[in-house]
Amino acid sequence: MYFEGLLDAIFGQRFNPVYHLGALCWFFYWIVSITGIYLFLVFDTGVNVVYDSIEWLTHDQWWLGGIARSLHRYASDAMVFAMLIHMLREFALDRYHGVRWFAWFTGVPIIWLLLTSGITGYWLVWDELAQYMAIASFEWLDWLSIFSEPIANNFLREGSLGDRFFTLLIFIHIFVPLALLFVMWIHLLRMARAEINPPKAIAWGAFGLLMVLSLVFPAVSHPPADLSKVPVVLNLDWWYLFVYPALDWMGAGAMWATAIIFSVVLSIMPFIIPHRAPTPAVVNLDNCNGCGRCFEDCPFGAVTMQPRTDGHPSYEFEAIVKESFCTACGTCSGACPSSSPYRRGEELITGIDLPDVPLTAVRARLNAEAKRLTGDVKIVVFGCEFGGALKELESDVVGTVQMSCIAQVPPAFIEYALSRAGFDGLVLSACRPGDCYHRLGVHWTEERLTGYRDPYLRPKIPRDAIRVSWARPTEMGKIRRELGEFVQDVTNSKKKLTHDSRVELESVAGE
Ligand code: HEM
């Protein structure tokens, strides 16, 4: 998190590439595909001509074929790099557990498919490196003894490797990346509106870097494969080819065991590492009008709409929660038109709510904090579990209300805080944009505040009484500073809402 703070300082919070690693993987995939199609169309695929054909592309047509080859290679490397950091981040930020197991579990085959795609690409050059890799790979496969004759024998003497075998390699190099694409699609099936395109600035920046690399260090081949010689000096692409020194070092059997154990342990991690499983959202049919906003906003596709089961004369649909998809972020209750804090009654019952952190408890906490504060101004901070530590911000002028996700409460709660509860200012403090623990909470909140998304904050609500402070837990200094400035602003300019404007707000709220 400290390191990411440094990247925030360099790139800005909105264009920090680490918040868009999955999307960057997709972006690199498209670069690899487009350049790959060009290379495939232009180069000759016969085993005896392929090397010369790639040499021609690299040196004679360097301005197109050479750049395409380098981009193909460096974008593939970048994809492994982005994937590894993406995986480590999801693990470190605890976003792989419970109902989120699916993305993690389907990520594991992606690792192997990506490595295989890259490795088979290196074969196609048919240089000394390809020769070494092909022999080592088939020796590894031969260890399983599933073929009647060891396939590595194909590479042991001149003339034994035919064009048809080479065509098979090309087929594998096309088929495996297509399978990868398919699994990448499956990977996202449980995420609504998954980000598959990085912000434009990041995409252009990444593309520019790859172009610079391609021009400064163009991808080149080793000397042509020669089966009568054993290759001695090889320059490995460590992003993909680290497996070969490992294979040389540990032997085929141990390598199989390592690969299998690694995959199995990685796959079952979401199930074996203990974690707190929050209770999924619950629909209260009496308060659900079937509007479908919860269905629209759920970041995990956990809410679906079905025909009414209670025979209500006016409403056609009702929301239902697929418990095995719900992360209990509460975004649904923040979208629900019934989630109004102005509703009468001791208990606030809404159309869809979280049993662990019900809206009625959020409202009660808000009112209790308003009563507790004794300072000249009253400020409340709305925050989530994954931003800064709210408790540390409390004082006689600052109260805090923690919710599951910042999108759990609708803008009506902001109105309520600034009118009926009597606060002079309100701060929203949660995860950074693009990196919300519950994926879309910050995004939806920003859209609700700016009026792009229902339920939106009404224009009558004074914007200078509201601040946002998106920050990670390690940025308490930033939150404190921004909060301090806000408290000062509210105090100095006497932004405190007058009795009259409160009354006005009350009447707006009543509409
Ligand atoms: C080429 C490789 C990969 C691509 C293109 C990819 C793509 C993505 C994308 C686009 C997202 C959604 C981001 C969002 O909108 O919130 C995502 C989330 C995720 N990915 Fe990957 N991913 C890849 C590899 C992996 C691997 C290897 C793992 C782990 C083994 C993994 C685990 C996850 C997890 C746990 C999430 C978060 C799910 C959640 O928030 O509920 N991914 N990935």
Image (tube, rainbow, N blue to C red):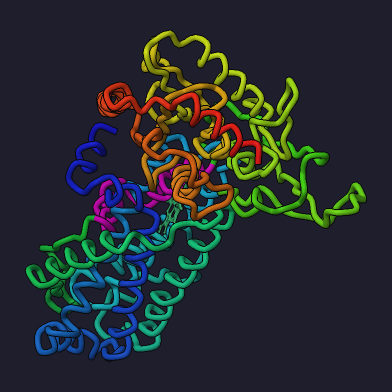
**In the image, residue 293 lies at what x, y percent?**
65, 51
**In the image, residue 370 lies at what x, y percent?**
51, 16
Dominant secondary-structure state across the stretch colored magenta: helix
For residue 42, which quarter of the picture? bottom left
| Quadrant in which the N terminus appears | top left
> Compared with residue 353, is residue 61 higher up or lower down, i.e. above or below?
below
User: Relative to the observer, which residue lies in front, 28 or 369?
Assistant: 369
User: Relative to the observer, which residue lies in front, 53 or 158?
Assistant: 53
User: Relative to the observer, which residue lies in front, 429 or 299?
Assistant: 429
Q: Does the magenta segment cover residue 65?
A: no
User: Relative to the observer, which residue lies in front, 247 or 430?
Assistant: 430
Q: Residue furthest left?
A: 216
**In the image, residue 429 lies at what x, y percent?**
40, 32
> Compared with residue 35, is residue 337 higher up or lower down, i.e. above or below?
above
For residue 10, which quarter of the picture? top left
Residue 393 visible in image? yes
Give the magenta-colored segment's residue range: 239-267
* Residue drawn at (58%, 41%) of the image: 331
Q: Is residue 472 left or right of residue 98?
A: left
* Residue drawn at (34%, 32%) of the image: 472
* Residue drawn at (86%, 54%) of the image: 314
Q: Does the magenta segment cover residue 260?
A: yes
Q: Residue furthest front?
A: 500
**In the image, residue 77 lies at what x, y percent?**
26, 61
Residue 77 visible in image? no
* Residue drawn at (31%, 56%) of the image: 80
Q: How many marks?
A: 0
> Compared with residue 159, is residue 371 higher up or lower down, i.e. above or below?
above
| Quadrant in which the C terminus appears | top right
